[in-house]
Image (cartoon, rainbow, N blue to C red):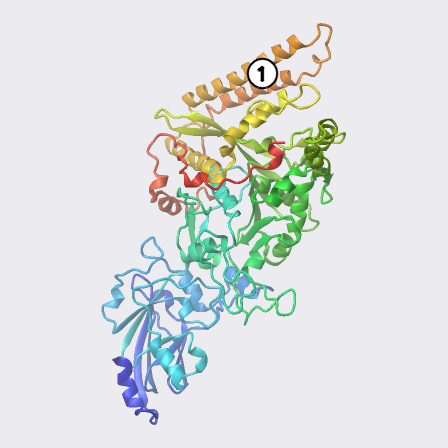
Amino acid sequence: MEQDAWKQQFFNDRLPACPLKGHWLTFCLVDETGSGKSYGGLPYTLYDSAGQQHRGRLNGDGFASVADFFCGPVILVMEERYTGQEALYQSLMTRPFYALPITELQVRAEQTHFLVNHDQHGEHNPARQNADHFYQVEVSDLVRHSAHLPPRSSRTHPPTRQVQKMMADLGFGPPEFSSHGLVLFPKKFTVLEVRPLRALRPAISIHDQFCALNLYQLALMATLSYCDFGQEPSTAPEDKVSFPLDPSIGNLFVEYLSCYREAWRFDSEQAQRFYPVYEEVAYSRRFEILPFDPELYGQGDTVGSLEHPERLHFFNDVESGTDTQAFICHHTEVVLIAVRGTASGADILRDADAHQVSFVEGIGKAHLGFYQAFRAMQNFILGYLARFHTGQRIIICGHSLGGAIALLLAEGLRRMPDAHYNILLYTYGAPRAADSEFTVGASSLVHHRIVNHNDPVPSVPAPWMNTTAKLWIPGAITLFSAPAPGGLLFAAGLVRMGGNPYQHHGEQHHFMPIMLPDGTHSSVLWKPGCESIQEAGCNRALQLQGDMPDRDTLLRQLFQAGQHFMTASYIPAAWATLRRWQQTLDSQGTLVTAREFDLLDQALEDMRAQLRAKRRELARRRPANDRSHETNDPLNAEIDRLHASRERLASLRWRRIEARDVYGSHAGAAHLQASLKRWFSHRENREAAQFASIPTPSHNDLARPQTLDIDSIV
């Protein structure tokens, strides 16, 4: 073997001979096309078997020739720090926290591209033909500090490590290079194909305007918040961390996206494949998960308590009892925060505690349980922003309970003095989180609130509620032993006495179901502006009978509770909306076709007829001399709103879709067509029908529902 050949002239059986000098070698760095121009002029250092340094620079084609070094293999390293002036790299290298050791080699590798659209090295590099040795290498092979670089990928032609280890064991060459650097052999020409440092990141619009892209992308991110962070070890790591759990937050951002691999799972029980629209970016522009390198980053809250990725990016409040969970990460344009919805018994108890308390960060009052969760995570979010917010758009998303907490978080951040945070909020199936005074005070917060047809959770807490857990829970228990006092206590714990009613915040976007010509189901997303549609069955209008609200309509919605789940409901509907709007944009059609208008208009007319019938029924029950209801009849008001909604629907028959309606700030971006080509390469995204049907959920997708908030059924 080659190792044995050089060893024989350098050693006898047990003792080294005098070192010989005069050996030579040549090597080059190339990209996947076989060109070395991307690496032209890079500085390098070779360490020979006697520990001598040989410095130089690659020529314009990425080649180097080195002569007159001590015999035996040499170790190549390329650790020269970046000295250019590009603002991105300068900011990463000089930031006060987690300054990155970015090398010239890293910057060059970030400017190269994969020859084909996948994460693996190519197999047919033309530079391989003339090489004595050909290795597929990564930047992390050639530098000391690599925690901020992606995990190494599999490769067909990996560099050899045995000789390097043998040299270290025998005491030849600098011992610090036993774990990094590459071995090159004398009298040989070696070609090093450097893997491009490219990453994928979900494309997210930073514009205020609602767009179908954000609807779909942020639904996936909100669902990801239900996953664990997935770090091993999860606490007290000593030298390195990994993220093997798929799906998990760390696995997505580190093992997949940082390594230029597409991910499609955002729920541990998910069977359907939902791919985000990914844009290809230079590695340093990815969503960053901060590195764990105790040698470089020793800061911690207490002595011996090192910070690590899970502590920095993942909030999981198990100590104070709120059980709030969220993750945060960022890139150069976006800080992304996703808040988890109801997933545990602690969440259910918090959901039920709808007593109103002052929102001290602003004005108005908030749901006590949601407010406690927001306060629990507030310092975690503020600490992260203080370190890594450099003017990016802060985009917050959340589903169910997570949407309610996200609203309070967004408004709290917006009102931070002198912070100037620019917030964009998307919520899915969120309950009411605060009162009407809060809603007025937060009117300038950009909030797109998505509601799926008969999802029951957005109907709660009802405007009349002030659910005090200290009263209604004992009252519910007492009902079984003493029905009369128990019932009074239960009612007192539910009904608000004085103050302002609960009220939704944000611009509502509502999925309304339709059936396509082939019999499959889909939905139309629009802004009805009508509480009857929002609460799916006119619950608000019909709850004013007698002394206690009538909850029958809402209870019937529980049979359609699947419309609250993300992977079985919101994500498929958001995907269908993105596909429908893409097709409408391509065909230069209108937002609502004539057939869709007829279907939706008939549904609205049916609801209007139900309200009229209910009004007649109530009129028959009232005494003939009772005129008190005529002045302010909620049914009449709701009928009027339905009429206004039908007129708004009619206007959509003529509205044309523009690229910004579909893609937001990414409309017209240089990367868009390449990103869409990658997205459409997956069969799930190639819908042949004129308008996309909602993918039918598999059995597995229904196996892990997000638990309903308890105050949706009280």
Q: Position of residue 469 (x, y in %)?
A: 70, 38
Tell me the quadrant of the picture where the N terminus can be found: bottom left
Identify the residue at image location x=73%, y=9%. 626
Above or below for 508 versus 72: above
User: Is residue 114 toward the left or the right of residue 85 in the image?
Assistant: left
x, y percent for residue 701: 43, 40
The reply to whether residue 46 is visible in this rendering is yes
Residue 470, percent across and down?
Answer: 72, 38
User: In front: 539, or 413?
Assistant: 539
Residue 159 percent location from the top left of the image: 33, 71
- On the image, numbered disc 1 is attached to which residue? 611
Image quarter where the C terminus lies is top right
Figure quadrant of residue 402:
top right
Q: Residue furthest left?
A: 129
Q: Most extreme residue toward the top, as rendered?
A: 624
Residue for point 68% across, 35% down: 477
> Which element type, helix, strand or loop, lies under badge 1?
helix
Labels in figure, total = 1
Q: Amino acid at mark 1?
A: Leu
Q: Which quadrant of the view contains residue 500?
A: top right
Neighbourhood count class around disc 1 (C-alpha, 10 Å): few under 14, some 14–19, many 20 upward: many
Q: Nearer the viewer, residue 145 or 82?
A: 145
- Residue closer to the observer: 62 or 116: 116
Residue that extends furthest to the right in the rendered view of this protein: 498
Which residue does the image show at 60% across and 30% down from the upper left?
Answer: 459
Q: Is residue 442 left or right of residue 430?
A: right
User: Can the viewer see residue 528 in this picture?
Assistant: no
